[in-house]
Image: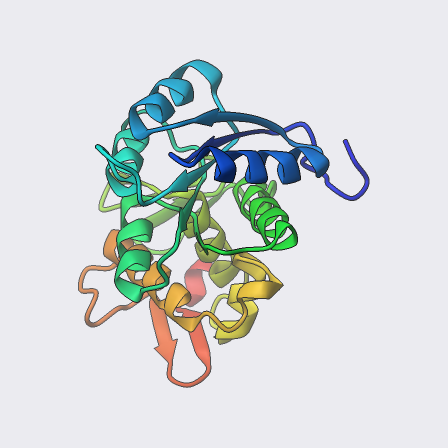
Amino acid sequence: MSATNPFAGKLILVVDDEPRMIKFVQFNLELDGFRVISAENGLQAVDKVRTQLPDLIILDVMMPQMDGFEALKRIRVVSDVPVIMLTVKDEEDDKHIAFSAGADDYLTKPFSPRELGDRVKAVLRRVSGPSSTAQEELRVDDRLQIDFARREVLVDGERKNLRPTEWRLLYHLIQNANWVVPSEILLQKVWGYEYQDDVQLLRLYIAYLRSKIEIDTGNPQYILTERGVGYRFAMPEAAE
């Protein structure tokens, strides 16, 4: 394991229909200590997810026959492996589609080798932690229980599985229960310093979390918005 890259040796699957892009990404990731395999289309990608078990996927959006969004949907049927979408576009609609389909990040072409490496490490860091908590289970109230060890919640007795990024966001909100956490701090803690101004990304994931745990997402009782500041997890005194 490299001192500069704690994730050296992790296996990255690069999916792109342009051989030059694959070579560019592979060369720079290997310089950073990663192992790299590649696929030229979505079908190959799904097959390699099953057979090679990569630690992370870099997936191009604009591909013939099957675009990256459709490939991501098929990948999510068989695996929760973290995925960074790669595209020449930089539109809010595309970001929303990517995150809704289960992407963990979104990188716009052109990008520098340093930005590529930083994004890959940031995503791997998110999905690998937090590794421990002060308590394994928390009963918020009669309706909501949180199992830290399994990274899932029970809502009215129904198990809700959280994606790694959703878990990290919920974790940091609960760690500061009944205190307002500024948006830029949540973005730094969950995504990394380079994301501290991406308020729209935070809003999307707050909405995803609310859709899983709130009775009425339009009138939330757990994850509250403090306008112009950030968010607060409302914890009953009995559960603190």
Residue 125 appears left or right of 178: right
Residue 99 appears left or right of 231: left
Q: Nearer the viewer, residue 129 or 105?
A: 105
Residue 65 appears left or right of 174: left
Occupied quadrant, residue 188:
bottom right
Please identify the residue farthest to the right as the structure is shown: 3
Asked which colour scheme the image uses, the reply is rainbow
Q: Which quarter of the rendered picture does the N terminus lie within?
A: top right
Residue 54 appears in the picture as rendered: yes
- Badge count: 0
Query: Residue 148: x and y, percent?
Result: 48, 42
Query: Residue 12: x and y, percent?
Result: 54, 31
Q: Nearer the viewer, residue 156 or 164?
A: 164
Q: Residue at x 53, y 65 (%)?
A: 195
Residue 143 appears in the picture as rendered: no
Q: Is 221 rendered above or below residue 56?
A: below
Q: Residue at x 48, y 17 (%)?
A: 52
Query: Residue 214: x and y, percent?
Result: 24, 59
Query: Residue 160: x and y, percent?
Result: 29, 41
Q: Residue at x 31, y 29 (%)?
A: 42
Please identify the residue farthest to the front as the structure is shown: 20
Occupied quadrant, residue 80:
top left
Q: Is 15 rendered above or below residue 164?
A: above
Q: Nearer the viewer, residue 153 or 157?
A: 153
Q: Nearer the viewer, residue 185 or 192?
A: 192
Please identify the residue farthest to the top as the structure is shown: 51
Occupied quadrant, residue 24:
top right
